[in-house]
Amino acid sequence: MKNTNLEMDKKLEELILQTPQIASALHFLGIQFLNHTDKTLKEICDKKQISYENLENNIKKNIFENSNNFPINSLNIDLIIEYLKHNHYIFIKQRLPFIIETVKKFEGNFPAIKSELQLVFPLFVEDFVSHIYEEEDTLFSYILLLNNASQDENLINKAKAKMMENSIKEFQNDHEIHDDHLKGLRSMTNDFEILPNYDISTKVVLTELKKLDEELRIHAKIENEILFPKALELEAKVFKNLDLKIALN
């Protein structure tokens, strides 16, 4: 485990300017960083009645926990979908709420960044959340039906009806078009670049957006390089089983 180099007697503003990820870790402990920038970690722990160990563990987990080496490719396709749906939950219930709140309360000294973020980010959230729910309701449900039909021939006819309406290749093409959700924000902020003269709000927002962007890239890579190839094979298998059933009849 890496060392966070936290100091109990250092002001929160100074700590966050050094390590902006600390802000979101505090958020999940019910601590709004903008309300405590002039306090030390010791003062915050005493006021909130939380142990320093608990605070440090949560900060370490938020900054350093990484599941990118998880062997996704070895999972069955239904478990891959569960993994992706869990990621969707993390995005919607954890990542986005903190960024939304931070953007809304943005107190940065750079009006251009502030106005653009407050204009563009809500539009991104609306489009992204809609995309996630649509993906779960259409692509994921279709793949799960194919998976079940590949194991239970009684579901072949049900799968046939859906296969007349959908195809994995069409889903794949559509996915590639809508793949880069944060392209506009990335361009606007020069790849979420953090300059030395940026204030605490600007550094926190850009750090969180960069982290979200990295996670979305990994998420998209799993879908493009693992889920879709497996789904194409699965669809072909069900088509073959369907042809065999028709031939036998």
Image (spheres, rainbow, N blue to C red):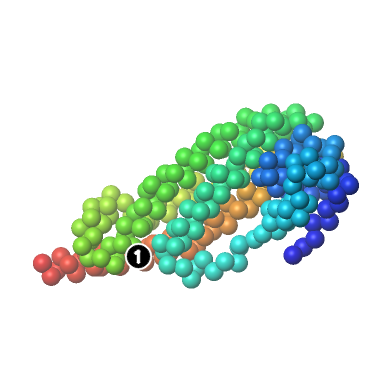
Viewed as shown, does residue 73 lie left or right of 110? left
Residue at the extreme right: 9
User: Is residue 6 visible in the rendered structure shown here?
Assistant: yes
Image spot of residue 213 (x, y percent): 62, 49
- Quarter of the C terminus within the rendering: bottom left
Image spot of residue 7 (x, y percent): 86, 51
Q: Residue at x 56, y 49 (%)?
A: 90
Q: Residue at x 51, y 38 (%)?
A: 127
Q: Quarter-wise, where is residue 27 in the image?
A: top right
Q: Residue at x 63, y 53 (%)?
A: 214
108 or 229: which is nearer to us? 108
**Position above or below: 94 against 67:** above
| Residue located beneath label 1 in the image | 234
User: Is residue 201 visible in the rendered structure shown here?
Assistant: no
- Quarter of the N terminus within the rendering: bottom right
**Position above or below: 31 against 142:** above
Image spot of residue 195 (x, y percent): 81, 43
Q: Quarter-wise, where is residue 231 in the image?
A: bottom left
Circle 1 SS class:
helix
Q: Residue at x 35, y 65 (%)?
A: 234
Q: Three-letter amino acid code at disc 1?
A: Leu
Viewed as shown, does residue 110 lie left or right of 180? right
